[in-house]
Image (cartoon, rainbow, N blue to C red):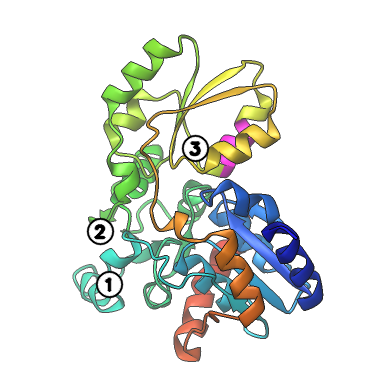
Amino acid sequence: MTLRDEILALKRERGAVILAHNYQVSEVQAIADFTGDSLELARKATDLQADLVVFCGVYFMAETAAILNPDKTVLIPDPSAGCPMADMITGEQLRAFKAKHPGAKVLCYVNSTAEVKAESDCCVTSANALKVARTFPPDQEIIFVPDQHLGSYTAEQLGRRFQLWPGYCPTHARLNAGMIEAARAAHPGAPVMVHPECPKPLRDAADQVLSTGGMCRWVKEQTGRAFIVGTETGILYRLQQENPDKLFYPLDERAVCPNMKKISLERVLWSLRDLQTEVRVPEAVAVRAKRAIDAMLAIH
């Protein structure tokens, strides 16, 4: 019996559901019941029938699923799968930042810890940050944490100025506009899609700025055959699966998040077998964090 067969058999036996982020390794995406970006996974987490959830992603994502499902068991196959961006701000730091801007509302990127979400007014993802920000009055001061690049992109689109925390995603921050020039030369005519976590010079040089879920939707609508993809390379698997007749080229093959790649088929199997590691969020934190998550999910 293969690892895949063992996992699927044990999943049926446990009555479990497996969720995977678009940046997971391809073999993990292949055995997932649902694969998506942060917004897609957050929405899916509110509509789960199974009592056991195996979350294949980084820790803050599993935390969000646990917050939304207090009566379910949420497992993460490798609890050391963290997020450097999420670690760039603490609840205490956010409280101090808020004290400098009394009256400001806090928009918190979902790529953050539960304690930071608990100090925020509303969560956002890269897919819905613009839509969420539009619900606030134009004269409302906005604090955006922790990603300065998604924050600046959202503010630019609205013609506003946010108070930005200087956080960033190391994987996206390494991408640069020179890579786009080289990619266009190698693949003439192929449009360049980049993630809004990328720095402004890269965003400005690209043809489209999209979340990973947005990339998947946009590509399906295009008649062109080739695309240059400026984000973590894990998304290439889903893009190719959904568009077998199209070609996808990474802007940089080295754009790999080491934390996203920590979860393997072996770890998924061990997680199901041993029911490890359960993600638990202290109730006092979870209740406040859920308000910010719910506020986001209420915006359609």
Looking at the picture, how far across and down is residue 209, in whole percent?
Answer: 45, 34
Left or right side of 183 for 208: right
Write down the region rendered in magenta. 213-218
202 over 136 or under it: above or below: above
Question: Mark 1: which secondary structure?
Answer: helix
Q: Which mark is residue 165?
A: 2
Distance from label 1 to label 2 (Cα)?
Answer: 9 Å
Label 3: which residue? 210
Residue type of the residue flagged with mark 1:
Leu
For label 3, count other residues whose C-alpha is less than 10 Å away and answer few (under 14), some (14-19) or many (20+).
many
- Decide which of tag 1 and tag 3 comes sooner along the chain: 1
Question: Mark 2: which secondary structure?
Answer: loop
- Outermost residue toward the front in this view: 1
For label 1, count other residues whose C-alpha is less than 10 Å away and answer few (under 14), some (14-19) or many (20+).
many
Contact flag, marks 1 and 3 (Cβ < 8 Å): no
Q: Which mark is residue 94?
A: 1
